[in-house]
Amino acid sequence: MTDGMLLREAIGDPLLLRYTVVVLDEAHERTVHTDVLFGVVKAAQRKRREQNKVPLKVIVMSATMDVDLFSQYFNKSPVLYLEGRQHPIQMYYTKQPQSDYLQAALVSVFQIHQEAPASHDILVFMTGQEEIEALARTCRDIAKHLPDSCGPMTVIPLYASLPPAQQLRVFQPAPKGCRKVILSTNIAETSITISGIKYVIDTGMVKAKRFNPESGLEVLAVQRVSKAQAWQRAGRAGREDAGSVYRLYTEDEFDNLIPMTVPEIQRCNLASVMLQLLALGIPDVMNFDFMSKPSPEAMRSAVEQLDLLGAVGRKGEQVTLTPLGKKMASFPLEPRYAKTILLSPDFQCSEEVLTIVSLLSVDSVLYNPPARREECLAARKKFTTSEGDHLTLLNIYRAFKKVNANKEWCRENFVNSRNMSMVGEVRAQLREICLKLSMKLESCGSDTGSVRRCLAHGLFVNAAELQPDGSYTALDTHQPVAIHPSSVLFQAKPAYVVFNELLHTSKCYMRDLCLVDADWLVEAAPEYFRRKLRPTKS
C-alpha cells in the first residue's frame, strides 16, 4: 500500500495491531508521508513493547540513503548491505564549471552520437517541460543536417504531464541503426528503468519546491542536485552493461554538493501534517519525534493556518482538534480542500466541489505541447469561462464524462486521459468519505455562483485584491502577486480572486484562480478580513 494509506490506517489504530512486520521501501525519497510514518511506526513499536503486545518489526529499505541517520533514529538498529549487480561505470567531469548547462548538454549529446556505436541509447537529465521541449527541437533540427556516417537519432521527451501514450515511447526500442536520445526530468531517476541506456548525461540540476512559512510562498526553483541524486542518476548507465556518465560539472563542484536531498518535510507547508498528527492523537505535536525536524516557524505557521480554518483550538501551547478539524482529518487532502468539501452542502453544490477538488489533487489534466500552442488554445476555448480556472476545469471534466472518457476526444482536446481517469478515482474515494460522514450531496446544476461562493469560503486565506495600478496584492501577506499566464483570467482584471497556490519563478504568480466577491470573503471570515481588507473610501 502507499505510505499515505498506512498513515490513514494509523489514525484508527495507532499501534498498527493488524501487522507484525512493516516494510518501508524507497526510504531515501523522504516524502512527507514517509517521514511522518517513521515517527508513527517508531512510537507503535515502543508502545507495543511497553504493553507487552506482539512486537512490531520494522524493515527500512532503500537504494541510496544516509544509513547512519536511519540507524540512529531507529534506536541504533542493525544495517544489512545487499550488493546489487552494478556494471562498471566510467565517470567523466567537465574541466571548467559550465555557465549554460543546456548548451553543454546539447554538445555532449552530439559528441557521443558522432563517436559511439548507434546501438547504445543516451539519457539526459533535465529540469522541466520547457527545457526538454526546447532541447528536443534543437536536437531534431541539428540531426537533420549531420553527415550520413552519423546515423539517425530519435529524440524522446519524458516528463510527468506528457500523455501516457507519449510517455510509453521511451520503452519502445529504436529502429535498427537508429539511436534513442531520452530527455527526462528526475522521473527517470528512481521511478522507472529504461533498457538500452548506456550513456547518461547529468546536468546536475533539478526543479524543486520550497515553502517559506513567513511569506506563505511556495518557490519552484532550479537548484543543484544532491550527491545521492547524482549517484542515483549515474546508476542508470550501468543497469544492463558497462556504461558512461557525463557530469556537466567539475569534480570540485560534485564534492561540494549536499550529501542527501533535503527531506520534503523541511521544505513544504505542514498544515496537513499537523492535522494528521492531531488526528493520530499525538498530545504534543510541536515536539513530535521527526527524523529530520522541520523549523519551529514552519510548525507554528501550520498551526495558525489550521486555527484560521477552524480545525484546531488553542489553550496556551496546547493544540486540540475541533469537531470540524476531526471531520477535515477524514479526508486525505490539504486542510483547505477538506474544509471546502465540508462547507459545500451549505451552498447545495457538493457534487461540483468534489469534482473541482479532485481535479486540483492530481497532476495537471491539461497537456500543453509548445509546438501546437495555437491548436491547443483553440481547442480549450469551448470550455473556458470568465469565472476562472476552477470552473473551466469543471467544464472539461463534464465534457470528458459526456463522451465516456473517449481517448480520441482527449487527444483532440489536449487532455491527459490517464490523469483524468485518476480524477474519477479520487472523486469516488472522496464521495465515499462524504457519505460516511452523512453529508448531503447535491448538484447546483448551472448555478456556478454558489460554487464560487463555496470556494471563497474554503480558500479565503488565498485571496488577492486588484490595486489601482492594475497589479494584485495577496490579502494575507500584502505581497505583490500576478496572474499566471496559463490562467483563463490572465487578460482579465477581476477585483477579487481566490487562488490555489503561489509560485515564484520570475515573478510571484497565482495559479488556478476563481473570481469571487469581496462580500463572500468577509462572510467567510469576518474577523480575519476586518484586519486584511483596506477600508474603502466613501
Image (cartoon, rainbow, N blue to C red):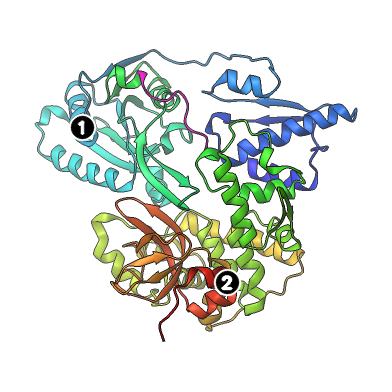
- The residue at which mark 1 appears reads as 99
**Range of residues picked out in magenta:** 255-263
- Few, some or many C-alpha atoms within 10 Å of disc 2 (few <14, some 14-19, many ≥20)? many
Q: Residue at 44% across / 25% down in the picture?
A: 232
Q: Is residue 416 visible?
A: yes
Which one is closest to the eye, mark 1 or mark 2? 2
Question: Is tag 1's residue or tag 2's residue first in the polypeptide sequence?
Answer: 1
Residue shown at 18%/25% (left/top)?
111
Residue 20: x, y in percent? 80, 30
Q: Is residue 413 left or right of residue 263?
A: left
Establish if 89 lies above or below 124: above
Q: Which residue is mark 2?
A: 457
Instruction: Verify whether residue 506 appears in magenta.
Output: no
Residue 442 appears in view: no
Look at the magenta stretch and give its main secondary structure: loop
Q: Can you give x and y, in whole percent of width and height, for residue 281 in the image?
A: 77, 46
Q: Nearer the viewer, residue 330 or 213?
A: 213
- Local secondary structure at mark 1: loop
Above or below residue 254? Residue 122 is below
| Amino acid type assigned to the residue bearing label 2 in the image | His
